[in-house]
Amino acid sequence: MSSIDLSGYRLTFDDEFNTRSISQSGVGTTWADIRPEWRYDANSDIGFGHSSFVDPSSGYDPFKVAGGALAITAVPDKTPSGYPGSWESGLIHTKNSFAQTYGYFEIRADFSSLQGAWDAFWLMPVTQTPDPNKAGNWQELDVVEHYGANDRGVYSTIHTTDPQNGVAWQTNRQVYSEMANPTGYHTYGVNWQSDKISFYVDGRLMGSQSTPSDMHSPMYLLANLATQNASGNNADTAGVPISSLIDYVRVYSNDPNAVAVTQQAVSAPDGKDPGLYGAQAAAAVAQPASNAALKTVSSDATVTFGFTLAEARFSFAGGHDVVIGTDGSVTDVTKAHTVVFADGSIDTSPNASLVDNLYYNASQKDVWSSHMDAATHYNQFGWHEGRDPNADFSTSGYLAANSDVAKAGINPLTHYDQNGWKEGRDPSAHFDNELYLLNNPDVKASGMDPLSHYLQFGKAEGRQAYDAIGKAASFTHGSFDAEYYLLANPDVAKAALASGGDTFAFAYQHYEASGWTEGRKADAYFDPAYYLAHNPDVAAAHIDPLTHYDQSGWKEGRDPSATFHTAAYLAANPDVAAAHIDPLMHYLQFGAAEGRHLA
C-alpha cells in the first residue's frame, strides 16, 4: 500500500485544538456546533442515530479542549434540549468558516471503543445539487465512520446522486479497511481530486473510487460523536458517558492559487505527529521534526535553552512568543522574564520601550551577532532600513499609511508612541488602537499608549488584539481599507513609498491589478479567497470580488469572509438593515467604533 505524499500541496486549514473555537452559529469562531437546516430547538441539532447534538447553552457542554485535543462526550438524555430520550453529544462544522474544492482532508483522532459509539469525519457541499432522479440521494463524502462495536473497522463512503447502474454501492462507493491495532490515535484522510477519491489510514492508501459527476464544488468539514441503539451497537448497553478525542483537523490543496495558512503550534497529546507529508505551510517558522507538545513558561520565570539563538526558530503569531529548538521542543515564553540561549541571554521582562528584545534579535540575527542593544539599533538604523521593532508594528506600513510622517523623516515608532495612537493611526494590520481601548476601559483611563500596554502587560494577561480598521479617509473605494492594506503588505508599502505618489491610491491600484487574485485581504474582514471559494459564479466571471460584494453581494446575503456574516450583522442591527446600508461598510466605518458586535 502506498503512502500519502503531499509534495506541491499547501496547508489551507489547521486546527490543532490548542484552544477552543466553537460557537452555536460559528460567527467569529472556527467551528459551529448546530447545523441550521437540522436545528431541533434553540440549543440543539436533531442529530442522527440515537443522539442529538447540543450547544453548551442547553445546560450540557459536550466539548472540552485540554492537552492539545478536543474531547467530545456523549451522555444519556440530560437536558430538555434535543430529541426526547436521545443521548446528547456534540458535532462541529465549518460551513460558515471554511470550504474547499479538492485536496487532502485529514483528522487525527482516538475514537471510542465503547458500545454505541458512532464517530465520523465527513464533508458536505456548501450547496447541494438536487437529485435529478428524485430518488432521495445527496452528496456527502465520509472520510471515516467508526463504530464502537467494531473498533478495528474503518468505513469510508461516497454518497452521490449518480446512478449505480446495478452495481452494489458497497462495491463502487465504499472502501472498508481494518486496523491491526485500533488503540490510541490514528489518522484518517481522503485525497479528493477531479477524477479520483482515495482514502487513507495512518498515511497508507486503503482504496480509491472514481469521483462522481456531482462532487466538483466546495465542501465543508464536519466531525462528530453520535450514538446508536442498534442491536449490535447500542449506547444504552454501555450506559456510561462515551468520549472521543480529536488531536487535529488539517486540510491541504494542490491548487496553485490556493492560499496557504500558518500551521498552529503542534500539540500532539501522545507526543507523536505525522507532519505535513511534504506539504508547505505559510508559517515563516517551520514545525520541528519531532513536533513536541507545547510547553508554557510561567510568569517572570527564566527559561534556559541548550542551543544558540541562531539555531532556534521562532513564532510570534497570535500574541504568543514561541521558541522552537533544535531538540524539537516548542516553548511559549510569552510570560518569561529572561530567555537564556547558549550564546547569550535576552531580557524579555515588560519595559516601556516598544522595541521587543526577543522579537528584534530573533528577526535580525545580524543585530544579535553585533551585541548591539535592540532599541538602540532600531532607533539609529533599523527604522531607516524598514525593520520592524516588534510583531505588532509595521515600520514600512506605518510610513506608507502616514505619508506626512514619511515626508518629515521622523522615526515612525517614536511618532506613534508620542502622537500617532492619539490620532487614531494604527501600528499594524493586527492591532487597532481604538478597539483595544474600547474593549479595555482601564487602559483608556490610564492614558497609556495602547500598543505599549499590550506589549508590556496585555499580551501576557491574554487580552485580545483586534485587526486594524482605518479612518474614513482610508476608504476611497467602497470597503477597501488602504491603511489596512499597506500595514498588511510590507512589499506594497515599500513600493508605495518608493513611488513618491499617493500611497493610498497606489494601494488600491495594486489590489485591483493583482492583490485580489493573490488572495490579499482588502480590509480586516474581506477575504477575496474565501469569497471566490464560496461564490463560484463570481470566480467564473473573473471580477473583483470586493466590488461584487459592495455592489450586490451583500444584498444577496453573501458573506465577505469567515469572520463576518452579512445576515447575522443585519439581524443584530435592525437600524442598519432598515437603512439598506452595506453592512460591512457600516461596521468598518461606524459599527466597530460604536461597539456593535458582528452578530
Image (tube, rainbow, N blue to C red):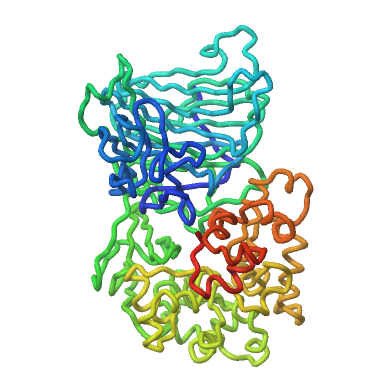
Q: Residue drawn at (65%, 78%), measured in percent from left and top? A: 472
Q: How many numbered marks, from 0 up? A: 0
Is 382 positioned to the left or the right of 287 in the image? right
Residue 293: image x %, image y %? 32, 50
Residue 272: image x %, image y %? 34, 41
Is the residue 14 above or below the residue 305 in the image? above
Most foreground residue, 132 or 273: 132
Residue 367 seen in render: yes
Residue 20: image x %, image y %? 37, 52
Q: Residue drawn at (25%, 70%), measured in percent from left and top? A: 299
**Res. 575 image quadrant:** bottom right
As drawn, the residue found furthest toward the top would be: 166
Q: Residue drawn at (55%, 78%), measured in percent from left and top? A: 426
Most foreground residue, 375 or 530: 530
**Res. 201 image quadrant:** top left
Residue 449: image x %, image y %? 44, 85
Is 510 positioned to the left or the right of 295 in the image? right
Q: Residue drawn at (36%, 41%), measured in percent from left and top? A: 54
Most foreground residue, 221 or 58: 58
Is the residue 217 above or below the residue 145 in the image? below
Is the residue 113 above or below the residue 497 in the image? above
